[in-house]
Amino acid sequence: MISLSINGRSVEAAESETVLQAAARAGIVIPTLCFDPRISPVGGCRICSIEIEGEPHPQIACRTQVQDGMQVITHSPALEDFRRTLLSWEAKRVLPSSFSAEPDKDLHRLLRHYGIAPSGKRTQPRDLSHPLIQVDMSQCIDCLRCVHICEDLQGQFVWHALDRGADMHIVPDSATTLATSSCVACGACVDTCPTSALTDRNSGRGADIENWTRTTCVYCGVGCEMNVGSSKGKITRIRPVIDAPVNKGHLCIKGRYAFSFNHARDRQTRPLARSGRKWVPQSWDAALDQTAAEFTRIAATYGSDSIGVLGSARATNEENYLAQKFARIVLGTNNVDCCARVCHTPSAAALKAMLGAGAATNSFDDLELARTIFVFGANPLENHPVVGARIRQHVLKTGANLIVADPRETELARMASVHLRLRPGTNIALLNGLAHVIATEQLFDRKFLHERVTAWDEFSDFIKDWTPERAEVICGVSADTIRKAARLYARVKPSMSFHGLGLTEHTQGTEGVMALINLALMTGSLGKPGAGINPLRGQNNVQGAAHMGCDPATLTGSVPIDERRAAFETVWKTPIPHSRGRDLLSMMDEAEAGRLKALYVIGYDVLPTLANMTATKRAFRNLEFVVVQDLFITETAKVAGHVFLPAASVFEKDGTFMNAERRIQRVRKATAPPGECRTDWQIICALADRMGHGEQFRYECAEDIWNEVRQVWPEGAGMSYSRLEMGGLQWPCRSQDDPGTTILHQESFGHDRRAALAKIEYSPTPEQTSEDFPFLLSTGRTLYQFNSGTMTMRTANSKLRPTDTLDMSPADAERLGAANGGRVRVSSRYGSVSIEVRVTPLVTSGELFATFHDRRVGLNSLTGPFRDNRVQAPEYKVTAVRVERMR
Ligand SMILES: Nc1nc2c(c(=O)[nH]1)N[C@H]1C(S)=C(S)[C@@H](COP(=O)(O)OP(=O)(O)OC[C@H]3O[C@@H](n4cnc5c(=O)[nH]c(N)nc54)[C@H](O)[C@@H]3O)O[C@H]1N2
Ligand SMILES: Nc1nc2c(c(=O)[nH]1)N[C@H]1C(S)=C(S)[C@@H](COP(=O)(O)OP(=O)(O)OC[C@H]3O[C@@H](n4cnc5c(=O)[nH]c(N)nc54)[C@H](O)[C@@H]3O)O[C@H]1N2
Ligand SMILES: [Mo]
């Protein structure tokens, strides 16, 4: 540390700091205009000029390093005059109407502070081509913040500065409109722009915002923190939290812009009951009475295990905790699950079985420490965009190695050191080939193998047969490429892997994750910074929903029921049923067989998103009673619902989420629920009360529920709301003074000091192409839409991506005579759909890729009945199909 004087005050600073940073820490505000902590200092505006004793001219604080004994003046009359002069020039670019509409823009604040009136006029037309971002270059002051933030934070390189000096102007990479540029609408440029040159469209006037609430994003498992602006009871604007540990001042198009669903006209705000084909509004009393009576009747007639409950990966931990408690002690069944089943239950199962904890081993902050990043079957630039951008930045800035295993040439694959472009459904062959190279070339970590790993002899015997040449025949990746990837992963360490559904949604999904864990065990890539096995979890709280106990076999904390039965029964004051619970897929089978009679579906549109929709529909139609608790009449409700209970959204309640790196973060109420909507936890408690269990469901607020969770879950006991108020914490966190755990397995694994390697044989899926079904279809996501589309389809995101597409290689399109944007009929052994074609070189000839977000397409009519051989996740990633042109 060194010491300097600022305005006569002695200030301590680190040698690496700038005067601006040191001053800010001391609470001294130096005005800035082109500065943003998220980008490296541009230093062009000179507003942050300061006087330094001994220097003849003013220096700029954002680029001046502190020095021991330095004497700084930040606010002399001369400096203030200088600032006023500079700002008077900039004021000529500011339109008076923008000045009053957007008081929080940095330049507008400064003008107000210095009492300078804006006097700008529009000198060129606005660019209104983009549905989310308005461009008004009349008001641009050439500060370059947009150019730099797009490079430094998002890595998209959309904005460019053309010409120099007085002629400088900023243009998108299309050189014409923003809509035709490569913009992905993360909104970072708007967020940093200090004028109204870049503003959000459709998000109200900044001047009208009455409240800002810090909360956690409602979409994916990254867990970005955001500030939600509201006015007159509506969400009107969302901005990233600058000091958030996960997103560090960044958001993606969904978090930033896709919030208008919250106030959609068809948002349901009253309980409804089905009467024939119609939904009839009900009072809460009537709807809850009917639900309680039906559950009671069905349990009495067919037994408790004829009812199932599905928790919601979109709702809070507190609510999911209550959903499983409700199933177990009110209904008396362990039939409780959630949509983790269909995505990363294979990851949780594999990690739990091999390493003793069913969650990501490391934190997102580790990725900047990794020298090799292995992205396996995941597409983070679209599906976890803030993490995707961090990966891209790390690779661009440090030259870290990137290995991508994906049948498609995703954007990350395009910039990878090695792209393992395998045939869908052949992960095991590829992973075993990689393990073979590590074993036979002795690239393993001898010390780690000795101290932390067992079953090496059997494993090395087994893996001998998996030569890269053998793997090549199956997975289509050349033996040399496999060798290259194995050498990078094993030699250039630390090596960190991130994986997605391309690994898990297969008949060998769990085993695929196990085969990936083998690589980490062999190379000692566990329990260390910059390493580990990290599933990129799906929704905002899917990790939490399952961890809270929305899983038939485990209780809160992911413990097998019989391991902690007594402890839970003491707190719950009721016995937990002994019968084996059914997972979602078995519930569907039971419904089809007529043995499951009722389903309580909380925040999960099962019907269109489960594979093999024809079978799902049959199962649902067999049910005597289905309750849907959601924001909207979902497809599930439309086809099968009997009672609809209107839930408050994430913007309308308090609670916590658990992100993909085990971080518990607060969710805070930004607006009141509309109409008669109630929070999920209030609804569950009201139902429990009606069914005679009010005593065990008496809570005043979300925090009361959380405190009970902490009581039954020792690894979460240390995370009180008062601590979470200061920022998220990662479990295990056992006591109030436990800082939480950023990296698991440092000294020993969850179950033991040593973990065993797993011998995984490859067994091809029964879903094979044939003469009738010659194409392999894989399904997944796009940046702009989210899952069932219930939320994003009701926002302006739909203008950027109106419907699902079938991605097809140019060669196949030509052969079939299918044009870009034309319609085709796709048929599998299970069903058929009509869908728009998108011709793209990103998919290989013979393979197809489609998204599943648009209910009008109903893509899951195509996907089939096969499931993961251990935990039943559907095989969404391989379906044999044929394609016919539609006339
Ligand atoms: N924008 C957006 N973001 C989302 C979602 C969304 O719907 N939209 N959904 C959220 C949810 S619930 C989840 S679970 C996550 C999912 O996030 P991801 O796991 O990234 O999801 P997918 O796009 O389904 O699949 C990832 C990749 O797997 C590849 N793949 C297909 N078959 C194979 C194979 O056999 N082997 C390998 N190695 N790769 C294969 C696909 O080409 C694709 O690029 O995203 C979350 N984030
Ligand atoms: N073909 C194909 N199909 C797939 C996949 C694939 O890769 N390919 N992926 C699968 C995967 S990984 C997943 S996770 C599923 C996702 O399928 P879903 O879980 O159905 O997807 P979401 O769109 O996340 O839907 C959640 C529902 O929760 C509601 N909701 C939001 N917030 C709240 C709340 O606070 N309370 C309540 N009660 N409701 C709320 C929304 O309105 C929405 O209806 O889809 C699966 N389907
Ligand atoms: Mo998911």
Image (cartoon, rainbow, N blue to C red):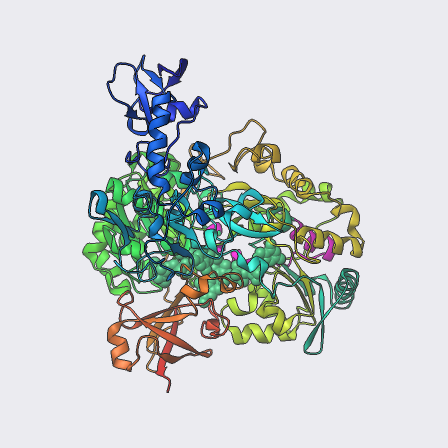
Q: Is 235 rendered above or below residue 298?
A: above
User: Is residue 648 covered in magenta?
Assistant: no
* Quadrant containing the C terminus in the rendered view: bottom left
Residue found farthest to the bottom: 887
Does the magenta segment cover residue 335? yes
Q: Quadrant of residue 276?
A: bottom right
Closest to the observer: 686 or 68? 68
Residue 501, can we see it? no
**Residue at the image point whose x is 48% and y is 69% from the top:** 854
Position above or below: 494 against 583: above
| Residue found at x 52% / y 49% | 543
Q: Position of residue 580 (x, y in %)?
A: 63, 57
Total marks in image: 0
- Left-right relation of 114 to 152: right
**Quadrant assignment, res 119:** top left
Please name the predominant secondary structure of the magenta segment in the image.
Answer: helix
Q: Nearer the viewer, residue 106 or 800?
A: 106
Please state the horizontal and vertical placement of residue 94, each as a whole percent of the image. 39, 45
Picture coordinates of residue 353 (x, y %)? Answer: 47, 48
The quadrant of the image that shows the N terminus is top left
Residue 702 x/y as whole percent: 66, 43
Query: In this picture, is 510 found above or below 65?
Result: below
Q: Is residue 477 visible in this depiction of the protein?
A: yes
Occupied quadrant, residue 531: top left
| Image: magenta residue range | 322-348
